[in-house]
Image (cartoon, grey):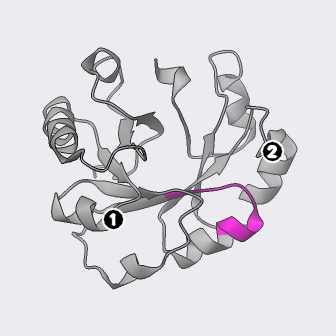
Amino acid sequence: MHNKFCNQYYFINKFDTNYINKQSKNTAIIYRNYNSNSHLDIILKLKTHCKYKGYKFFLANNIKLATQLDLDGAYIPSFNKKMDHLSYSYKKNFIIIGSAHNNKEIKIKELQKVDVIFLSSLFKRNNNYLGINKFKLLSSLTKKKIVALGGITNKNKKKLKLLNCFGFAGISYFE
């Protein structure tokens, strides 16, 4: 049976085949470009390219458009607290993923009926920095699949085995 989830998630904000083509088949592409409103042509090119290469393709912060374009799924960022997508109908294998930084946001993502929660920031020392221990604590508070996000490199990738997480996501790791 084909696994509908991927283990690696690559965030992109532009169509660049140099980086996309280097990915393994278990890598999903998440297009997020919050700066541009007119990017339908890029999304369609990405959809075609990802389908040709065998990658799953997700659109960030626009579930309605993702369903209309028959994409593999949609990504709900942590700042999006809306529940209006719950009234949409989806195809059978449509996947909704979302990110969270704390227990409150995890509970919101559960209410939004996401299939996978990206928990950040694991290694990247920013305002949302969790570290390994807090990451393990927060991930134990939900039954959803957890994906590590933030600051993952080849050096610290082995530490992911300590976390019992489903996979990892990032930008710079894949470039």
Pick whichever, 106 or 37, lies toward us. Answer: 37
Residue at (36, 57) in percent of width and height: 74
Q: Is residue 155 magenta?
A: no
- The residue that appears at 37% across and 76% down in the rendered structure is 85
Mark 2, residue position = 130
Q: Position of residue 39 (x, y in %)?
A: 24, 44
Q: How many residues crowd mark 1 within 10 Å: few (<14), some (14–19), many (20+)?
A: many
Front disc: 2 or 1? 1
Distance from the alpha carbon under mark 2 to that under mark 1: 28 Å
Q: Label 2 sits on what residue type?
A: Leu
Comparing 4 with 95, the one in front is 95
Residue 124 is left or right of residue 12, and the answer is right
Q: Using the image, determine if residue 50 lies above or below residue 136.
A: above
Would residue 142 be visible to someone looking at this image? no
User: Mark 2 or 1 closer to N-term?
Assistant: 1
- Count neighbours of disc 2 (C-alpha within 10 A) and say few if under 14, some if 14 to 19, many if 20 or more: many
Q: Amino acid at mark 1?
A: Ile
Q: Residue at x 77, y 37 (%)?
A: 126
Residue 153 or residue 43, whichever sits in front: 43
Residue 25's x, y, as percent? 31, 30
* Magenta-colored span: 98-106
Residue located beneath label 1 in the image: 63
Looking at this rendering, what residue extends furthest in the bottom direction? 87
SS assignment at label 1: helix
